[in-house]
Amino acid sequence: MKELKEIRINESNIQLKDNRVVGSILPEKASELNRTVTVHGNTVVEGPVYAHKLEIQNGDLEIQGAVFTHLELYVNSEATGNILFKKSVGSANSIVSRASKCKLIFSSDINAKTVTLYNAFVAGSIYADEIILENCVVIGGVFATQEIDITQSIIGTFNSPSVRIAQIVYLLLPSAFSIEKIIAAANTKLYNLSLADLGSLYKGKLQSENSGKIEMDIRTDEVKSTLANEEVQKTLRSYTVIGKVLAADLLDTDKFQNHFLLTAASLGVQLLKTYDMGTGKDGKPIMLTLDKIHEFFFDVLHGKIEVQDIEGKFDISQITGKM
């Protein structure tokens, strides 16, 4: 990265390139509430940002404080480089990135009216009315009040009245929820990774027995419940492998280290220290860093790291011997 020039903010519209913003970008008077902030690359903002519109034309960019926009946070589709938001990001309207050539990381939650993300890593959860994800990794949940559209992504879980999925979608948690039936495109696969040995995969070692991805059938793995009170009756559909997980929990699944890995991933840059997962196949420590976790999950998503299919069988004596 080039040497950055310090800048202090007092303008109505701000253009940032090769700058280090000391402190925050916050309005100090009414005329600055409609301020547009445009980032042309190679920029670090040390504090929070409030803007009517935040446009990111190119990386590298690091914003160390929380971000809120009144109209839109927009990432140029041709943007390259690294774009890192270290704290929560929100908008009263939309957050949009269709950039496929940049490394886009949100280290905390996203909250907006509409969220459209391509090729993004989200360490927290996404809350919106409408959410579109393609080629994304979301460690937390994807929660929409209206609809979700997910294509070729890894997510923790989802909950929305209407859900559409396409290509290959992975769930990290045992269950996900919708009100209407899930709409799946032709040849769509839905897998659950709650019993995959992510720890061994992260370390480059052989996967444990009785571990692997579970292929879910949105018809047979659906559990329909009716919730009612004196005034309202609502149908909720859950898509779950919880029965398989409960059976497997009687075996020793702690060695998978999934909980440790996902907790570290969800904390993102908020980790107070760098932990390791033990040693890899070469005997060297395997560190838990945001960049390595980002690379690992996208390698799983793109098939560079292959998760085995779970066998689905276990010896009852293994269970009775532990009780």
Image (spheres, rainbow, N blue to C red):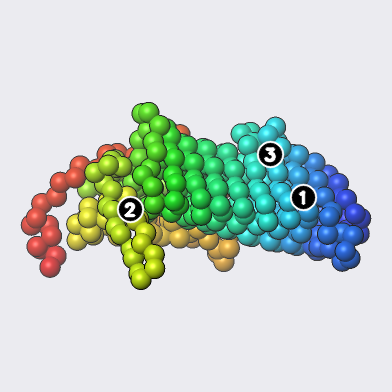
* Dot label at residue 92: none
Residue 4: percent from left, percent from top: 83, 49
- On the image, which quarter does residue 204 sit in? top left
Question: Is residue 57 visible in this depiction of the protein?
Answer: yes
Which SS class for mark 2? Answer: strand
Within 10 Å of the Cα at label 2, are there few (<14), some (14-19), or many (20+) other Cα atoms? Answer: some
Q: In whole angstroms, how far apart are the C-alphas of marks 2 and 3?
A: 39 Å
- On the image, which quarter does residue 69 sit in? bottom right
Amino acid tagged 3: Gly
Within 10 Å of the Cα at label 1, are there few (<14), some (14-19), or many (20+) other Cα atoms? Answer: many
- Residue drawn at point x = 83 percent, y = 55 percent: 34
Of pointers 2 and 1, the one earlier in the residue sequence:
1
Amino acid tagged 1: Lys
Which SS class for mark 3? Answer: strand
Closer to us: mark 2 or mark 3?
A: 2
Please name the residue that numbered disc 1 is placed on: 53
Residue 243: percent from left, percent from top: 22, 55
In the image shown, does 298 or 246 lie closer to the viewer?
Answer: 246
Q: In whole angstroms, how far apart are the C-alphas of marks 2 and 1?
A: 37 Å
- Residue drawn at point x = 43 percent, y = 38 percent: 165
Of pointers 2 and 3, the one earlier in the residue sequence:
3
Q: Residue furthest front?
A: 231
Closer to us: mark 3 or mark 1?
A: 1
Amino acid tagged 2: Ser
* Dot label at residue 238: 2
Residue 247: percent from left, percent from top: 19, 57
Of pointers 3 and 1, the one earlier in the residue sequence:
1
Q: Which image quarter is the C terminus in?
A: bottom left
165 up-or-down from 112: above or below: above
* Dot label at residue 81: 3
